[in-house]
């Protein structure tokens, strides 16, 4: 186990520990989305933005740039023409929701005792990548900036399961980037594809009555139960749409909510929110229409006498970076190979933001540290993994854009 933090890496580790102490999580409950101007994120930026501003002032050719939707970037311009590289780190934290001490920022051994780690909700999803970008600025300040092209270090506020924040960022840039690298917990694999998803809302409206006198029709809990059973059949049908790399489409309910919630009262409304996974070629609108038609076929227009409507919610697009587009990844892959000995391409099992820039024709991948804990359990990051990401990101930038100490390769 690492006995202590190397003094040369103290700033990197301390940045992560400081950020880990500041709340950034989407609140638990039926509200699963968080807006860019949510007070949680506004408060988080008060801790994060000054760190970027301080370091940007030390890098030749660097400046802070305000972006739409409460976002910002550090733009570093080289003296010579060259490619435009965008590195994105995200602020909302969505997982590890049952940590006992989510904002401790503790430095203690990993559960297996193999290394020291920083503990805190969001360290793998968000905060390690922000610390790595801060470390990148620190190193660029020491090496005189970049020699060619332009580098954008973007802080992205996407927490609404959409591409609105990255779309706003790309719209604000002076030119289309040659590559977007979204820093995320991928276990150091370069993700070259993922399924998309759309939230499909199934809304039921019936009658609110006292539970001692349930009506013969209009009982939305019964109707919701039938909808959930019918969705199993629609999931089976959706799974017939498959892709050899990305997998199958799906129809899976993940949230059921009722209103009103009152003592001994049967609610008059229900909403079932369905995770409809998408493959290239299936649009969110088409998937929503298909689900609506399937429910009406299986249940009729008014299950248990309840009015039923189906609507499209937030969506993220599917993505696959074709092999003939992957030459742009060579500098990143060389940096990974130099640090870890091999490069792994992987399809991401969930859905993230890569489909947004990719839909605009921008080659986009995700890359970053492992997510060591379970979905709801403790979130922690070993210092060795943090150092690896910092070294790989810095080396990749040098290989793309050069510095006064190391020319482009």
Image: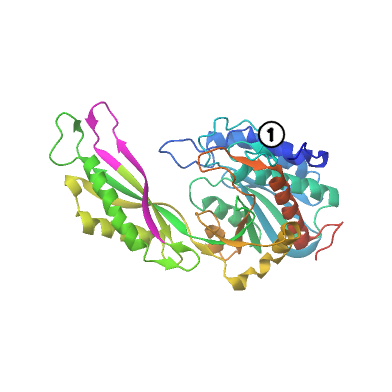
Magenta residues, as a range? 249-270
Q: In this figure, which residue is indicated by the disc labeled 1?
A: 107
In the image, is residue 243 above or below residue 277? below
Answer whether residue 281 is visible to the viewer in this image.
no
Q: Position of residue 142 (x, y in %)?
A: 84, 48
Residue 303 in the image: above or below residue 31? below
| Residue 268, magenta (yes or no) | yes
Left or right? Give the position of 103 relative to 140: left
Residue at 23% in and 30% down? 265
Q: How is the image coloured?
A: rainbow
For residue 112, which quarter of the picture?
Answer: top right
Q: Residue furthest top?
A: 263
Neighbours of disc 1 within 10 Å: few (<14), some (14-19), many (20+): some
Horizontal placement of 30 versus 152: left or right?
left
Residue 283 versus residue 218 in the image, above or below: below
Label 1 sits on a secondary structure element that is strand
Q: Main secondary structure of the magenta part?
A: strand
Q: Which of these two is toward me, 382 or 171?
A: 382
Position in image of residue 84 (x %, y %): 70, 61
Give the position of the C terminus as an image quadrant. Answer: bottom right
């Amino acid at each position: 186990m690492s006995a202590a933090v190397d003094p040369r890496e103290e700033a990197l580790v301390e940045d992560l520990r400081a950020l880990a102490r500041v709340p950034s999580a989407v609140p638990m409950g039926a509200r699963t989305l968080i807006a860019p101007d949510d007070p949680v994120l506004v408060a988080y930026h008060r801790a994060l933005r000054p760190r970027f501003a301080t370091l940007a002032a030390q890098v030749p050719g660097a400046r802070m740039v305000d972006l739409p939707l409460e976002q910002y970037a550090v733009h570093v311009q080289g003296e010579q023409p060259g490619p435009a590289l965008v590195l994105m780190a995200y602020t909302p934290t969505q997982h590890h929701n049952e940590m006992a001490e989510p904002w401790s920022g503790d430095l203690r051994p990993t559960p297996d005792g193999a290394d020291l780690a920083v503990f805190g909700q969001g360290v793998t999803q968000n905060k390690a990548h922000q610390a790595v970008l801060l470390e990148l600025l620190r190193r660029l300040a020491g090496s005189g900036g970049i020699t060619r092209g332009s580098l954008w270090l973007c802080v992205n506020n996407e927490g609404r399961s959409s591409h609105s924040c990255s779309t706003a960022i790309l719209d604000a840039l002076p030119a289309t980037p040659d590559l977007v690298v979204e820093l995320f917990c991928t276990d150091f694999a370069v993700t070259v594809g993922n399924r998309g998803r759309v939230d499909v809302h199934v809304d039921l409206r019936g009658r609110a009555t006292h539970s001692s006198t349930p009506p013969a029709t209009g009982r939305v809990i019964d109707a919701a139960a039938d909808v959930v059973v019918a969705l199993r059949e629609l999931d089976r049908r959706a799974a017939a749409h498959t892709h050899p790399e990305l997998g199958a489409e799906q129809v899976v309910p993940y949230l059921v909510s009722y209103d009103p919630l009152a003592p001994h009262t049967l609610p008059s409304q229900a909403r079932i929110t369905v995770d409809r996974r998408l493959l290239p070629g299936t649009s969110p609108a088409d998937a929503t229409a298909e689900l609506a038609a399937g429910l009406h076929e299986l249940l009729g227009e008014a299950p248990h006498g309840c009015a039923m409507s189906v609507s499209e919610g937030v969506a993220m697009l599917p993505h696959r970076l074709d092999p003939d587009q992957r030459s742009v990844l060579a500098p990143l892959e060389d940096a990974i190979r130099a640090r870890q000995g091999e490069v792994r391409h992987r399809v991401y099992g969930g859905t993230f933001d890569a489909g947004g820039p990719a839909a605009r024709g921008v080659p986009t991948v995700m890359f970053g540290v492992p997510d060591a804990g379970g979905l709801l359990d403790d979130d922690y990051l070993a210092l060795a993994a943090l150092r690896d990401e910092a070294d790989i990101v810095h080396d990749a930038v040098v290989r793309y854009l050069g510095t006064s100490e190391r020319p482009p390769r």
